[in-house]
Amino acid sequence: MTHQRCGTCGAPVHDHAYICTGCTGALTLDLQRIGGYRHPDGRWIVGALTDLIVTATHGAVISGQGGRGDGDPDDHLWPATTAAVREPANTVALALHHEISADLAGWCRVLLGESGISSGTEADRAKANPAWWLERHVDSIRRREWAPAMLADLDRHLARAARLVDLPPALTVPCPTCSQRVDIDPARGDVIECRCGALGVLAWWIEQVAPALPAEPMTLAELPAWLRTRGYEVTPKQLRNWADRGQLPHLADRGAKTARLYHAKTALEAAEQSGARRVVPTSLTLRPALM
């Protein structure tokens, strides 16, 4: 039996579609990366369309927002529009936003037309948020002759957006009160406040999400990973030097062939007093601006 080949990667396709299941997954991911999506842990990951608008305005507040038109409470998180962009600071980013938006709208029109839909709820949703609508119809798209060209265009758009978007990565931490993600800037020394009203300095926020002080003592080999959750980069060699100088006292010896044990709290105090290198705590979450 002969099988049709994927129009993108050349892999066999067993169901008469124009792209294989692997490339269908890539198509889904591309649409999510362009329009934005909900991460499994609850975070909202903004897409390239929103990033391009923020880049075009250099972070200026914009009033025009997208939305699916279905009453979702997170409508304000869907791709930004160009409605309020009057004097863009980056015209190339704005032009790419227009180009991607036009392509998405065009694919929606084609798929709707080939499906015999000219109006109604589906047409309204496709118009309100093309990327979201197309993502939910990838199984139909993969059976269209133009699917390989669509995937190639999306890959090209995302590559160009990645070169243009100048947003720095954002550090976020879950609020212990309401579970919303709160942006964290490690360089700030002032109070950081969540929209629910919870507030505190950076050290307080780290304390809320960092693993609790372990009840059991730890070896020198185990301490570095735990100290990174508190924002300190310390090597076993540094810890050994502190121990030799008496800055990091160990517990009672358990025998010559048994590793010495130390209290994590004592190691944390030694790191603070010794001015150990500060790093982004592994208890915080790094969200890339463009995924």
Image (cartoon, rainbow, N blue to C red):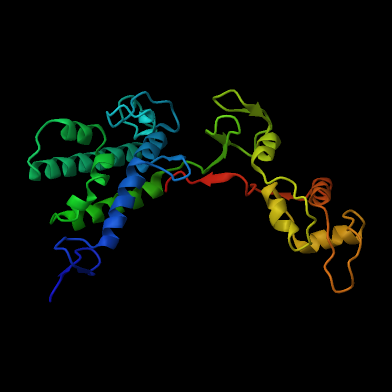
Pinpoint residue 87: horizontal percent, then vertical percent: 35, 27
286 vs 57, left or right, is right
Pinpoint residue 227: horizontal percent, then vertical percent: 72, 52
The image quarter containing residue 257 is bottom right
- Whether residue 156 is visible, yes or no, is no
Q: Residue at x 26, y 35 (%)?
A: 129
136 vs 279, left or right, is left
Q: Residue at x 34, y 46 (%)?
A: 32
Q: Height in image: 223 above or below 167?
A: below
The image quarter containing residue 80 is top left
Q: Height in image: 141 above or below 168?
A: below
Pinpoint residue 111: horizontal percent, then vertical percent: 14, 45
How many marks are shown on the rendered structure? 0
- Whether residue 127 is visible, yes or no, is yes
Q: Residue at x 89, y 70 (%)?
A: 255
Q: Residue furthest bottom?
A: 1
Of residue 21 and residue 288, the one placed in the foreground of this image is 21
Of residue 284 and residue 105, the one placed in the foreground of this image is 284
Pinpoint residue 46: horizontal percent, then vertical percent: 41, 40
Q: Residue at x 25, y 56 (%)?
A: 152
Of residue 25 and residue 47, the one placed in the foreground of this image is 25
81 vs 239, left or right, is left
Q: Height in image: 90 above or below 254?
A: above
The image quarter containing residue 9 is bottom left
Which quadrant of the rendered structure holds the N terminus? Answer: bottom left
